[in-house]
Image: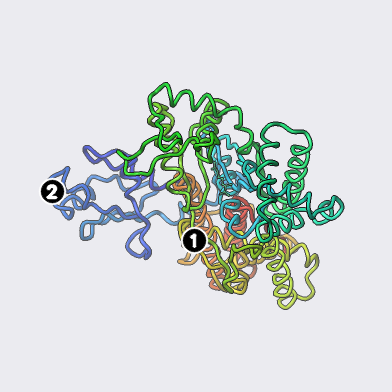
Amino acid sequence: MDYKHYIAERLKIDGVSVKEIEEDLAVPPDSSMGDYALPCFKFAKVLRKSPVAIAEELKTIFPVGGEIQEVSAVNGYLNFKIDKQKLAQDVLERILNERENYGAGDEGKGKTVCIDYSSVNIAKPFHIGHLSTTVLGGALYRIFNFLGYKAVGINHLGDYGTQFGKLICAYKHWGNREEVEKGGIHAINDLYVKFNNEATEEMEREAREYFRLIESGDKEANALFEWFKELTLAYVKTIYGKLHIQFDSYAGERFYTDKMQPVIDELNEKGLLKESEGARIVDLEAFHMPPCLILRSDGASLYATRDLAAAEYRKKTYDFHKCLYVVAYQQNLHFKQVFKVLELMGKAWAKDLVHVAYGMVSLEDGAMSTRKGKVVWLEDVINKCVEKAYTVIDEKNPALENKADVAEKVGVGAVVFGALYNNKIKDIVFSYDKALSFEGETSVYVQYTCARARSVLEKAAAEGYDKTQAEAVEPCASEAELVKAISVFPETVKAAAENYEPSYIARFAVDAAQKFNKFYIDCKILQAEEKERAFRLRLTEAALVALTNALTLLGIGVPEKM
Ligand code: ARG
């Protein structure tokens, strides 16, 4: 039940739309005053009345009844109390009917959302800095699909640039096939690091020549490049597997090699291309930005040139409703420039391009150095977290079956949740111990809650309790709180999509888990009277459904037992 909508539709305020009212309705932290509250301060101007008077007046005209038990006006707020018994009945019925579709929607029907995320660089380490883009993008991908959109996951590979000339040169001098075959991405990275540390001027010259050979289609150079690319992709795909990440396209920067010229021509025709010290630029001074570099003086294209071509291609290919770029805030300027250039080219759809920027992730021990060769590989962070998870689980429940499987779900979940729990723009310091704490605001806490709920349900089933009868019960405070907490899942998913903020769902999960545990402690479930027991079992099951759906959208597995 979307109560905000329900209330907004029944509240008629001149000159204010239902949607606006819906957005203004808030859930007060303390529900003793009401379950929803509408601050009336905003309407004072339009209605030329004081907020207190507005609240009083609205109170008298609001049709109490149905789902709304009581309306009160307090200090310029209009407070609504929901009929808790009715709410509980509606919410449980809905969740237990919809199950894994609880929270899904169809507002995205017929609309495509392109999501550019993870976007790894070939032959470079897949490091902790790629965690956020990968899991944020992955979560948004699932969230949009859940809401009926067609999400297109795009891995805009970094597979273009002079570094590949360097790599080939390093390989030719120092590498051999078996070692690279065996060492994969690590061996490739070692060669690249060695080049940066030790290359002579002669080798630098050779490297430029190799790059030129790749560009001009030389067979051997391209075969080597393709090989490095294959090894990198094989490697990152194992990590994507662990993180439940998928893509529909791996069209990287190279893919746009032959798609840049038309864009450059168009810029030229539209009089946007200027010469500056031999280079071609789009002047953005009027918008208080440095110029967007399109071609270097030697004629080489740039990162931005390829992004212009990519945006054009995506619009043509997918006719997107939105195209998201899940990329660190360090690239704020880059995307502002690219979007502005497209706007200046007269692309009406430039307004549908969104840079979904996020903050940095570092480790508690400060080990996030990108200096030569010293990077923290994401794989190592995941493995370490899974190992630690194993120890934690083993301590807590030594008799548990499938410990390795549970540790995998808990460990990977902790890494993912660590990146998704906070507002995405915040810088995060990841701590293994905090991430794996059963007491904190963590994924393991939520997972454990799910296992607890499942175990109650299994016991009930074993004892043959009937939980199907849905007789109305007046919920106690902690039951009502839990009902309310899980009832907001659908609107939480919508808000997460609207704001590109999977953290809303992570926060929902922690809140609902906390409410479940309070209910679990306050109320006897299996020992309750028959009518109460049936209600509590249904509530337990509904909470499990909501929590499972939340974790699944985030890409976190739910162990059956813990
Ligand atoms: N590979 C780039 C990097 O690691 C990110 C690419 C993001 N996507 C884009 N269309 N520019 O910085």
Q: Position of residue 259 (x, y in %)?
A: 57, 27
Left or right: 31 in relation to 415? left
Q: Residue furthest front?
A: 202
Q: Amino acid at mark 1?
A: Asn
The quarter of the picture where residue 74 lies is bottom left
Ligand 1 quarter of the rendering: top right
Q: Secondary structure at mark 2?
A: loop
| Residue 524 visible to the viewer | no
User: Depth check: 207 or 273 in front?
Assistant: 207
The answer, for residue 444, to whether it is visible in the render is yes
- The image quadrant of residue 404 is bottom right
Query: In which quadrant of the rendered image does the C terminus lie?
Result: bottom right
Number of the label disc, if any, that sits on residue 422: 1
Q: Upstream in the sequence, badge 2 or badge 1?
A: 2
| Circle 1 crowding by C-alpha within 10 Å: few under 14, some 14–19, many from 20 | some
Provide residue 177's location: percent of width, then percent of height.
Answer: 85, 50
Residue at 58 percent across and 69 percent down: it is 363
In this view, the residue farthest toward the right is: 178
Query: Which element is circle 1 on?
Result: loop
Corner quadrant of residue 79: bottom left
Q: Which residue is mark 2?
A: 49
How far across and how far down the image is residue 14, in percent? 21, 38
* Residue 229 position (above or below residue 128): above
